[in-house]
Amino acid sequence: MSPNVRGALLALLAFAIYATHDVVVKFLGAEYHAIQIIFFAGLLSFPLVTIMLMNDRTDGHLRPVHPGWTALRALATVITGVSAFYAFSVLPLAQTYAILFAAPLLITLLAIPVLGEKVGIRRGLAVVAGLIGVLIVLRPGAGAFGLGHIAALTAAVAASFASVIVRKIGAKERSVALLLYPMVANFVVLGAALPYVYRPMPIAHLGMLGIVAAFGFVASLLIIAAYRRAEAVIVAPMQYSQMIWATIYGALIFDETPDGWTLAGAAVIIASGLYIVGREARANVSENQPVLESRSRPQASGGMNR
């Protein structure tokens, strides 16, 4: 089995785990505020991350080289988690994923001011087409637009901003620092807000939070392993497999069937994202390759980007 095939299979497994993770989030979201879910899922992630840190033999400290960008990324991660978890709790899975799939398009746009990236006419048209796909999914004016859609869009923008920041500072920051600061930000910020939304949780629901923490951690490790084994252009498109899981889980568990508009918009968004990934793979098109180098996705742990 070639390294690219291994990487693709690892990525497919990771995104299948992420999709299952999001099903648990949707279940819990029917009973609890997104802030409470993320706070406790993040809290339960600390022992897993601590074990990983104990195995990190890299010399040095955990103070960020770029504290300003690190703080902005931590804030973006907090916003991403709350927004994405809320969107999963109130929107159909397939519709939420379709909106979140706009992230590569937004990364391409944000890379212009943050990374100084130059976007040619072809990638520019792909971004425009993808954003039209988002409008197809949202159908503004059709009466279906609500807070859940705004939350999903917010998550896509914030996650894209966090990914571009990692591309900007990742070469100089330790991987553990990139992981740890968003987790601490989640703990501090969401912990301060927790008393206003807290509801007592039975043991079964605490166990489900443990599943959210464990699945997010394992899937992140699998994504890292996939990128280490395979070319980014092979691994990056595997995220779109989540739409298949969303359709299956939505139908079997939540009695959700994606409508034609959602499927059409998702098809446009995915096609645009695939085109951008393909274009970035060409050395003479993108110097920074911000989409291909992205490792993050909206989740409570803040993403393990390197």
Image: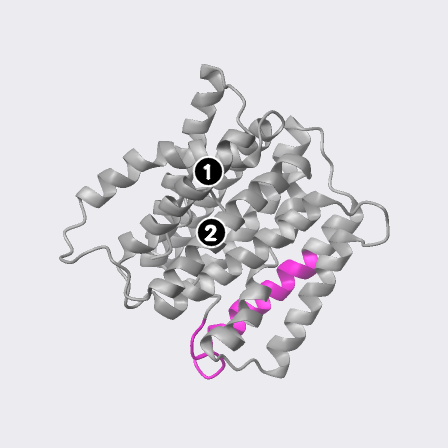
The vertical placement of 122 against 100, above or below, is: below
Counting from the top left corner in percent of width and height, residue 52 is at 24, 43
Counting from the top left corner in percent of width and height, residue 291 is at 49, 66
Counting from the top left corner in percent of width and height, residue 289 is at 45, 72
The region drawn magenta spans 267-289
Residue 135, located in which quarter of the rendered image? bottom right
Identify the residue under disc 1: 192
**Can the viewer see residue 151?**
yes
Q: Nearer the viewer, residue 295 or 282?
A: 295
Q: Secondary structure at mark 1?
A: helix
Q: Nearer the viewer, residue 261 or 195?
A: 195
The vertical placement of 199 against 41, above or below, is: above
Residue, x 68% and y 32% (percent of image)?
251
Q: Nearer the viewer, mark 2 or mark 1?
A: 1
Rounded to the nearest whole Å, what is the CA distance between mark 2 and mark 1?
A: 16 Å
Residue, x 60% and y 76% (percent of image)?
123
Identify the residue under disc 2: 77
**Can the viewer see residue 231?**
no
Residue 186, located in which quarter of the rendered image? top left
Neighbours of disc 1 within 10 Å: few (<14), some (14-19), many (20+) = few
